[in-house]
């Protein structure tokens, strides 16, 4: 048994949300009890005790839209003219990068951000992968990196027509194979979804084949949805529908589906998202960086849509994404009182609720029966910290770099900012070597 105690415990439980001197008792990969430190030490005297030393103990964070493969773009200089819009960003950067990835590139470009997830307190991710030059076994390669890093993950391959019919078929097969493998293995650290790139890169025949291949798996879809205005214009001109309407017509929406971005959706599309219980993944930094607009997520949540929070590969730090969401929607709505409640709900409630659709136990909460995904944050509150002001302290006082211990599935993966069984410097050195070679090929 392991106990994590002597800390300010944020539980996110529906009962006792905060204990000023709390302790979590872990048996194998499950939380078995929560209570005052002295009481838990007396009850479990033989358990290993991890002393939080007054720091904050809280649930590990969840990212519902990630792109691990984007790592090797960091610092890369494009020789083309600077992109003027989102379509040019895709064509000049991302669609050239993903084609250049080898199996080894896929592994190490995943390992770097996975270790960064651990360092920033992100314990579960939903990743959306692309590598047209190496589709077969690509998800299994990423799964190997997830096992090594110790991060819980739900993976998919983004099927697209942009690289031809044969590659699209390979993507369909990879999704189906990986979903089936995860379900048969019973591995509670890995799950699969059916990945789709976006409406404007998928013809009707390919979408139909994806829907047929996904039947019987119980998995939902993970798809970029109306991220840019060009996606909407393409859908209307080619199919006579808006993007969400087209996805609904193929029965792609649903409670186990992630619609990423949803920047350009109208009220009728919001109604479709709400009625289908589709999870919308908001990615504020990416939307600003790609200059595609501000998603109307505040309005979506007012309509009862379950909006969660992702990063789109921009960062592995969900604290950073939380801050960006708060600022973006104040700016978008020109209202300093906006977005106080919605971003914390996205991160701490809606992400958890969606993740529980794929993983069999409670997540994102510190309570008996939940997964033992726990972080210790080096934060000494300068003002009173209590149950009714937790989110304010997190927003203004914490960042991913404040995380000094990360426990995932009961395993101490990082202790006092040091990985317990991974040589981070070695991973980064190999990644630099591979990235330099990929840049030459690019």
Image: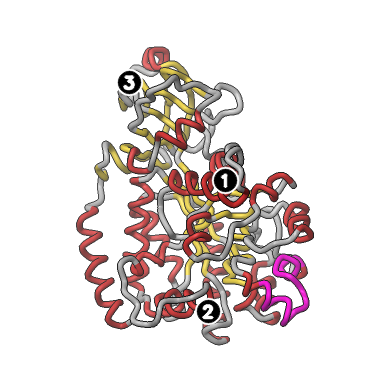
> Where residue 99 is drawn, which disc sits there?
none
**Could you tell me how far apart the alpha carbons at marks 3 and 2 are, in whole angstroms?**
52 Å
First of labels 3, 1 by sequence position: 3
Task: Bin the neighbour count of mark 3 within 10 Å (Cα to Cα): few under 14, some 14-19, many 20 and up.
Answer: few
First of labels 1, 2 by sequence position: 2
Q: Is residue 239 magenta?
A: yes
Residue at mark 1: 330
Residue 427 picture quarter: bottom left
Judge left or right: residue 2 versus residue 188: left
Q: Are marks 3 and 1 in contact (CB under 8 Å)?
A: no
Residue at mark 2: 170
Identity of the residue drawn at 63% across and 70% down: 229
Residue 114 picture quarter: bottom left
First of labels 3, 2 by sequence position: 3
Tell me, yes or no, if residue 112 can be seen here: yes
**Furthest residue in direction front, as rendered:** 334
**Could you tell me how far apart the alpha carbons at marks 3 and 1 are, in whole angstroms?**
50 Å
Q: Nearer the viewer, mark 3 or mark 2?
A: 2
> Where residue 46 is drawn, which disc sits there?
3
Q: Nearer the viewer, mark 1 or mark 2?
A: 1
Tell me, yes or no, if residue 48 can be seen here: no
Q: What x and y, as percent, mark residue 7? A: 38, 23
Q: Which of the pair 273/340 is nearer the observer?
A: 340
| The residue stretch that appears in magenta | 232-248
Q: Nearer the viewer, mark 3 or mark 1?
A: 1
């Amino acid at each position: 048994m392991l106990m994590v105690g002597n800390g300010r415990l944020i539980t996110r439980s529906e009962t006792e949300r905060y204990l000023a001197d709390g302790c979590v008792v872990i048996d194998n990969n499950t939380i078995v009890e929560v209570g005052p430190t002295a009481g838990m030490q007396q009850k479990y005297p033989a358990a290993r005790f991890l002393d939080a030393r007054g720091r904050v103990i809280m649930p590990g964070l969840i990212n519902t839209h990630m792109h691990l493969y984007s790592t090797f773009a960091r610092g890369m200089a494009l020789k083309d003219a600077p992109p003027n819009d989102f379509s040019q960003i895709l064509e000049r950067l991302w669609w050239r990068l993903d084609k250049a990835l080898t199996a080894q590139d896929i592994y190490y470009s995943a390992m770097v951000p996975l270790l960064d997830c651990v360092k920033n307190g992100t314990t579960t991710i939903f990743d959306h992968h692309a590598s047209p030059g190496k589709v077969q076994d690509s998800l299994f390669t990423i799964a190997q990196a997830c096992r090594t890093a110790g991060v819980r993950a739900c993976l998919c391959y983004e099927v697209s027509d942009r690289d031809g019919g044969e590659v699209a078929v390979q993507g369909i097969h990879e999704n189906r194979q990986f979903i089936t493998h995860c379900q048969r293995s019973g591995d509670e650290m890995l799950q699969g979804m059916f990945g789709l790139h976006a409406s404007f890169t998928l013809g009707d025949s390919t979408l139909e084949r994806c829907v047929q291949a996904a039947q019987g798996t119980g998995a939902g879809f993970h798809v970029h949805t109306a991220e840019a205005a060009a996606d909407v214009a393409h859908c209307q001109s080619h199919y006579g529908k808006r993007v969400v309407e087209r996805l609904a017509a193929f029965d792609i929406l649903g409670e186990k589906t992630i619609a990423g971005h949803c920047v350009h959706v109208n009220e009728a599309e919001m109604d479709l998202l709400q009625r289908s219980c589709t999870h919308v993944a908001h990615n504020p930094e990416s939307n600003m960086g790609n200059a595609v607009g501000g998603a109307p997520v505040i309005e979506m949540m007012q309509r009862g849509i379950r909006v969660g929070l992702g990063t789109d590969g921009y960062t592995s730090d969900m604290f950073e994404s939380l801050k960006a969401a708060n600022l973006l929607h104040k700016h978008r709505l020109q209202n300093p009182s906006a977005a106080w409640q919605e971003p914390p709900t996205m991160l701490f409630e809606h992400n958890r609720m969606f993740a529980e659709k794929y993983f069999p136990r409670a997540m994102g909460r510190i309570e008996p029966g939940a997964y033992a995904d726990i972080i210790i944050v080096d934060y000494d509150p300068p003002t009173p910290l209590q149950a009714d002001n937790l989110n304010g302290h997190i927003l203004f006082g914490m960042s991913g770099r404040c995380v000094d211990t990360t426990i995932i599935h009961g395993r101490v993966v990082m202790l006092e900012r040091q990985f317990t069984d991974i040589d981070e410097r070695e991973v980064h050195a190999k990644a630099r070597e591979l990235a330099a070679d990929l840049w030459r090929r690019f």
